[in-house]
Amino acid sequence: MSAFKPLDPLLHSQLRLAVMSLLISVESAEFTFLKEKTESTAGNLSVQLDKLDKAEYISISKSFKGRRPLTTCSITQKGIKAFESYVENLKNYIT
Amino acid sequence: MSAFKPLDPLLHSQLRLAVMSLLISVESAEFTFLKEKTESTAGNLSVQLDKLDKAEYISISKSFKGRRPLTTCSITQKGIKAFESYVENLKNYIT
DNA sequence: TTATTATGGTTTATATTATAAACTTATTTA
DNA sequence: TAAATAAGTTTATAATATAAACCATAATAA
């Protein structure tokens, strides 16, 4: 027991982990909200959201608020499972 | 509260974190022991140990066991503090 | 009206990183 | 003596994180 299970590289990233951490406790969140909370640049955030989306850890919907673009993200079941098992695995490293 | 504090990039690495995790609970450990426990390649381990050493998170002593090289590592006070605060910061992300 | 600045992003370039492959030196073993 | 093993180190490469540059539209100022 307590071997070092591999840490999902998609989650073992400061910004993506922060995003998942935010999304896991809300229904959905807007791009600008995530940007503020994570204090990231828009470019970086955009790239990392795409990666999470491609892995189907989150789903992204693009629409408009009035006439401005609105990107809304929410975590998927797959994302929740991945996050939870990442956290479980991580515990072996830090306790 | 619960902002995302930055994660020390030196520790936010699977192998280096595993090494630190091992070293924190022992007096010292040999290269081969770390290699087995972390299931890493010698090359990768060698590189990561060097980085931890340069950051003074561990200290490395090279000697001989009989006639074979023996590399022994131990965590430093600086390393312990860094590890502990990494863990504290990380908690904001995963709880 | 025409600039100028702000908003909400995306794309691209770059520097850093993690990692394994290849190598070195010495020592056993067949 | 040749081949395999041990204990690493050095180097090459592919992946990654990140910010800079860019784009389109909207609001504001001159």
Image (cartoon, coloured by chain):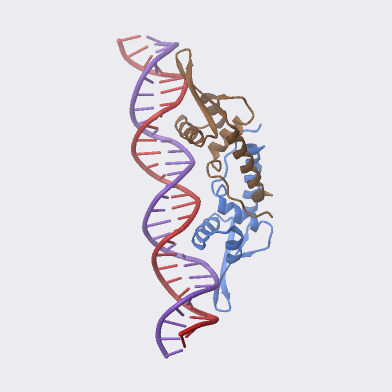
Chain colours: A blue, B brown, C purple, D red
A50 to the left or right of C26? right
Residue B21 x/y as whole percent: 61, 34
Q: Is residue A51 above or below residue B83?
A: below
Q: Residue at x 56, y 41 (%)?
A: B11
Q: Quadrant of residue B75?
A: top right
Q: Is residue B27 above or below residue B50?
A: above
Residue D9 x/y as whole percent: 41, 28
Q: Residue at x 62, y 55 (%)?
A: A20
Q: How many numbered discs sit on the rendered protein?
A: 0
Q: Residue at x 58, y 31 (%)?
A: B76
Residue A18 x/y as whole percent: 60, 54
Q: Quadrant of residue A62?
A: bottom right
D20 to the left or right of B53? left
Q: In the image shown, does A45 or A86 lie closer to the viewer?
A: A45
The N terminus of chain A is located in which quarter? top right
Residue C14 x/y as whole percent: 38, 53
Q: In the image shown, does D28 or A8 lie closer to the viewer?
A: D28
C22 to the left or right of B80? left
The C terminus of chain A is located in which quarter? top right
